[in-house]
Amino acid sequence: MSQRINAFAQSPELFKKFVEFGMLVKSGSIEHEILNLVDIRASQLNGCGFCLDMHVKQAKIQGERELRLHHVAIWRESTLFSPRERAALAWTEVLTHLPAQGVPADIYERVRTQYSEKELTELSFAIMAINGWNRLNVGFQTVPGSADKAYGLDKANLS
């Protein structure tokens, strides 16, 4: 696979603003461990190899346990995730693959038991951000691992 377009080179101002948006999302009230799970799950659902590779490495560098990383795809069956993490993963899935009839009330109610209105809004913005990155990188076929040195991801020792 070779990259089709370098979005940063073609639209540096838009790229910079989207990075700023992502950084703002990361500075909110949602725990970094949950944001990592959100990024990983959305990237799995969207088939974004670049983002999945990146976020698994980031999570590992930030201390996430390897088994939990492997269990993100099977979070419903796994005993390794808290109710708050499960709610975030359910919300990620429903906002990533929006049902034709909208978000089911039972999923919304389950998420609302774990998150305040502000937190749920911030979680939703985080899901928007990763879905945007996924679409950009899938569309332009960004090569997984191609930015490891630039982002310090080589420190994950997962090459």
Image: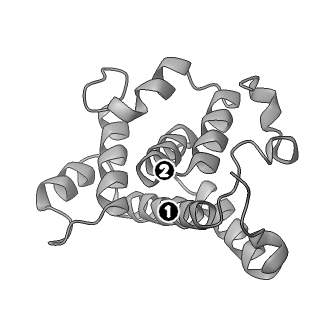
Nearest to viewer (mark 2 / mark 1)? 2
Query: What colouring style does the render use?
Result: one colour
- Relative horizontal placement of residue 68, taking residue 63 as reference (left or right): left
79 to 7, vertically: above or below: above
**Marking on residue 131:** 1
Residue 53 % position (x, y): 63, 40
Quadrant of res 41: top left
Q: Is residue 128 above or below residue 10?
A: above
Choose top left, top right, bottom left or bottom right for residue 56: top right
| Mark 2 neighbour class, 10 Å CA radius: few under 14, some 14 to 19, many 20 or more | some
Q: Of the residues shown, which amino acid type is indicated by label 2?
A: Gly
Q: What amino acid is at disc 1?
A: Asn
Q: Secondary structure at mark 2?
A: loop
**Left or right for 137, reference 158:** left
Q: Would you call the spot at circle 1 few (<14 residues within 10 Å), some (14-19), or many (20 or more)? A: many
The residue at the far front in this view is: 1
* Alpha carbon distance from label 2 to label 1: 11 Å
**Relative to 116, is 6 above or below?**
below
Residue drawn at point x = 71 percent, y = 29 percent: 61
Q: Residue at x 87, y 48 (%)?
A: 150
Task: Judge from the rendering whether residue 24 lies leftward or rightward of residue 68; answer left or right.
Answer: right
Residue 144's tag is: none
Q: Residue 109: image x %, image y %?
A: 17, 55
Is residue 125 shown above or below 142? below
Q: Contact, CB < 8 Å: mark 2 with mark 1?
A: no
Relative image position of residue 111 (x, y in whole percent): 26, 51
> Dot 2 corresponds to which residue?
47
Q: Compare residues 5 and 127 and report the one nearer the observer.
A: 5
Give how far across and how far down residue 113 sits, in percent.
23, 48
Q: Residue at x 45, y 51 (%)?
A: 42
